[in-house]
Amino acid sequence: MLKVKIFNFLKFEKKNFIDENEYENIREEQIQISQQKIEEYLKFNIDVNKTFKVEYFFITNTKNKAEKFYIEIKKLNYTAQYFFSPVEKIFLIAGLSPIMNVSDDVIIDWTKEMCEFGYNYDSKFDGWEITNNYE
């Protein structure tokens, strides 16, 4: 009986939060959202060719996945923190990118990279916002 319980626990840990189809949908959705955000920033005369830190957001379903994600994104010189949301029953991961340009081409490529990075750690890229100017 104990072997079955341990096996079921391990099986649960391996359950994917995001499958390949969902990854493709998230990627396309986030690209569209990023394009819309750049257009909005331009309407408000925010110079997207200046450099900013970008606040990012991810979600996943286990503490183990959140910890692995946290460790790996810090290796890329991003800040990171994660916490459990008892209401939504998910782990939220957020932080800041290194200083970067947020022009259309740059942010679209970055969005694609973040979607793929999240997928590699079974986490969903859930968006971004620019922070104060850090020129």
Image (cartoon, rainbow, N blue to C red):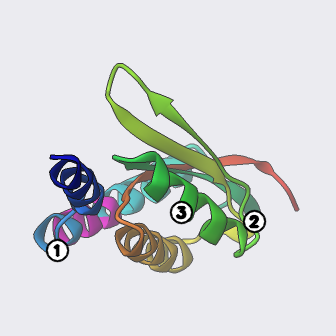
Start-end of magenta stretch: 24-31
Q: Give the farthest residue toward the front.
A: 1
Q: For mark 2, what is the residue? A: 50
User: Disc 2 or 3, which lies upstream in sequence?
Assistant: 2
Q: Which label sits in the foreground, 3 or 1?
A: 3
- Taking the magenta stretch, the answer to whether it contains residue 74 is no
On screen, residue 21 above or below 105: above
User: Disc 3 or 1, which lies upstream in sequence?
Assistant: 1
Q: Residues within 10 Å of mark 2 (few under 14, many from 20)?
A: some
Q: For mark 3, what is the residue? A: 69
Q: For mark 1, what is the residue? A: 20
Kindly identify which numbered label has been placed on residue 122: none
Considering the numbered disc 1 on the image, is that residue within a helix, a strand or a loop? helix
Q: What's the distance in space between the residues labelled 2 and 3, CA to CA?
A: 28 Å
Q: Are marks 3 and 1 in contact (CB under 8 Å)?
A: no
- Where in the figure is residue 98, as x and y percent of width and height? 75, 67
User: Disc 1 or 2, which lies upstream in sequence?
Assistant: 1
In the picture, measured across the screen, residue 46 lies left or right of residue 99, that is left
The quarter of the picture where the C terminus appears is bottom right
**Residue, x 28% and y 68% (percent of image)?**
27
